[in-house]
Image (cartoon, helix red, strand yellow):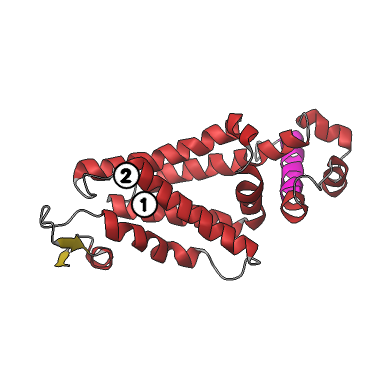
């Protein structure tokens, strides 16, 4: 037995339908009546689960974010090295968005600019993921793998901001191609600047990300 109740299945169906309709029509153009019709439930049933249309919207990221955070914790434990963990983090986000484009549209185009969303449980879970990435960067600085003069919050913003930017462009251009193919170009642009020189700090040396990828060991070359 799956352990799922009919009520849970119905709630998830409502959210799945709402995600699709919000992504296709936009939040303001979507009505509860449309969601109810497509989910094959009554409007009254929707209000049994959610207090308003905004309540439906704010509930959409809960399941996806819980799954992402849980998977990231278990997956990243198996990966050694800060650079590898950051690369895996970028992959997990882009893979989630590519395989769930309607969710990506709701998360980045509708929810991200909504200030009230920041007061929700879903946003708290999203911030947990942000903090985990910040911790990865801090650990890399402490271990000497990343430069000691870095601001972890700035680096996190650069990495996750690039993920959002790549995904938003992909959505706006009709979801053509694969954003997962952007994992290495995206992370390379950041890692070239933040990996610590292998020589121990000579100002004239710079770690090459391509060398690091191939060997797992930082190498330095003269500028």
Q: Is residue 188 left or right of residue 42?
A: left
**Quadrant position of residue 173:** bottom right
Picture quarter with the N terminus: top right
**Label 1 secondary element:** helix
**Quadrant position of residue 119:** top right
User: Which mark, by number, is residue 137?
Assistant: 2
Indicate whether 200 appears above or below 176.
Answer: above
Q: Provide the residue span drawn in magenta.
A: 5-19
Please report whichever mark, 1 or 2, sits nearer to the chain's N-terminal start: 1
Rendered residue at 73%/52% (across/down): 20
- Graded by Cα atoms within 10 Å as few (under 14), some (14 to 19) or many (20 or more), the crowding at tag 2 reads many
Q: Is residue 223 left or right of residue 163?
A: left
Judge whether residue 92 can be spotted in this image: no
**Label 2 secondary element:** helix
In the picture of the structure, the residue carrying the numbered disc 1 is 86
Q: How many marks?
A: 2
Whole-percent x, y for residue 175 in the image: 63, 65
- Graded by Cα atoms within 10 Å as few (under 14), some (14 to 19) or many (20 or more), the crowding at tag 1 reads many
Magenta span dominant secondary structure? helix
Rendered residue at 32%/55% (across/down): 84
Foreground pick, 222 / 6: 222
Tell me, yes or no, whether the two marked residues, 1 and 2, touch with CB atoms within 8 Å: yes
């Amino acid at each position: 037995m799956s352990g799922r109740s009919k009520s849970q299945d119905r709630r998830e169906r409502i959210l799945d339908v709402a995600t699709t309709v919000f992504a296709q029509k936009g939040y303001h153009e979507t009505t509860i009546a449309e969601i109810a019709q497509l989910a094959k439930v009554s409007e009254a049933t929707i209000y049994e689960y959610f207090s308003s249309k905004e309540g439906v919207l704010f509930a959409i990221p809960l399941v996806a974010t819980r799954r992402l955070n849980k998977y990231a914790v278990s997956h990243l434990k198996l990966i050694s090295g800060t650079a590898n963990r950051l690369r895996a983090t970028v992959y997990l986000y882009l893979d989630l968005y590519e395989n769930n484009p309607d969710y990506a549209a709701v998360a980045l185009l509708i929810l991200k600019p909504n200030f009230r969303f920041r007061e929700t449980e879903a946003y708290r879970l999203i911030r947990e993921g942000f903090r985990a990435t910040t911790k990865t960067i801090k650990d890399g600085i402490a271990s000497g793998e990343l430069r000691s003069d870095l601001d972890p919050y700035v680096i996190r913003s650069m990495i996750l901001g690039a993920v959002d930017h790549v995904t938003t462009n992909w959505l706006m251009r009709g979801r053509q191609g694969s954003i997962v193919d952007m994992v290495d170009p995206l992370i390379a642009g950041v890692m070239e600047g933040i990996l610590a020189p292998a020589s121990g700090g000579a100002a004239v040396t710079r770690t090459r990300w391509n060398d690091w990828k191939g060997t797992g060991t930082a190498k330095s070359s003269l500028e």
